[in-house]
Image (cartoon, helix red, strand yellow):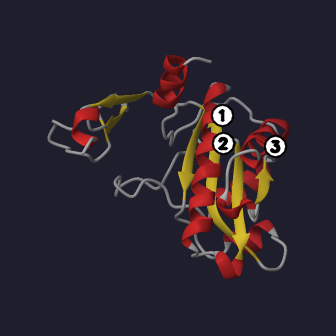
Amino acid sequence: MNGMQFQDLVASSRTYRRFSDQRVGETVLSALVDAARLAPCGNNMQLLRFRVVGEKDECDAVFGHLRWAALYRDWDGPEPGERPHGYVVICLPSELADNPIRLIDVGIAAQTMALAACARGLGCCMIRSFDAGLAPELALPEGLVPALVLAVGGRGERVVLEGPDTEHGLSYWRDADGTHHVPKLALEDLLV
C-alpha cells in the first residue's frame, strides 16, 4: 500500500451510524481484534481486553445500553434493520479506566480496528456513551470495565466529507436525503 492508498483508506474510514443487512461474523470481529493487538500501546503493557459480540441476541442486548450521536438530539439511534451486526467492546482494568495513557491505548486500538474494518468494506462507530448496565450484560470478568464500544457492520448510509464553511460549522449533520455530512478543516488550517 502506498501513501495515497493509505490516505484514501483513512478518508473512507468514517463513522457510520446506520448499517446494512450485511452480517459480520465473529471471525471478522476477531480479525479486527487481531489487528489491534499488533498496534502500539503505552509501555507495551498490553492491558486492553476485548469482548467480541456477534450473535443477534447479544447484539440486541448491547444496543440497548448505547447512546448514539449526541448532535442528533431527536434521534435515538439506528432503527431495527439499520443496527450493527457486531460489536467489539474494548475493556480496561477498572482501576485504570480513567488513566490517560490507557485511554490513548483504547483510541489507538479502536482506530486500528476501524481502519481494518474499512479495508474489508465495513463501517464502524466508536461509542463511549453507554450505561452502567453494559458490563453486567456482557458478563465481563471481575475487575474489567468497558472503555469503548466499536459498532461494526455493513455501511448503511452515505457519508461525505466537506469543508466547515456551511451554516453547521464543524458539527456533523444529515440532509433531507439522509446523507451524513462531516465537516473537516483544511490542512493549512491545522498546521502551526
Q: What residue lies at 52% left-to-right and 46% top-to-bottom? A: 78
Characterize the local packing of mark 2: few (<14), some (14-19) or many (20 or more) Cα atoms within 10 angstroms: many
Image: 183 above or below 103? above
Residue at 83%, 41% in the rendered image: 26
- The span from disc 2 to disc 1 (Cα, nearest Å) is 6 Å
The residue shown at (55%, 46%) is 125
- Say few, some or many: other residues with alpha carbon within 10 Å of mark 3 (under 14 / 14 to 19 / 20 or more): some
On the rendered structure, is 158 left or right of 48?
left
**Closer to the N terminus: mark 3 or mark 1?**
3
- Cα separation, mark 3 vs mark 1, equals 11 Å
Image quadrant in which the N terminus is located: top right
Q: Nearer the viewer, residue 45 or 147?
A: 45
Q: Is residue 83 shown left or right of residue 76?
A: right
Q: Amino acid at mark 1?
A: Ala
* Image spot of residue 134 (x, y percent): 68, 69
Give the mark nearest the N terminus, 3 or 2. Answer: 3
Judging by the rendered image, the residue that carries numbered circle 3 is 30
Residue position marked by numbered label 1 in the rendering: 117
Reading the image, the residue beneath label 2 is: 113
Placement of 136 over or under 73, stated as above or below: below
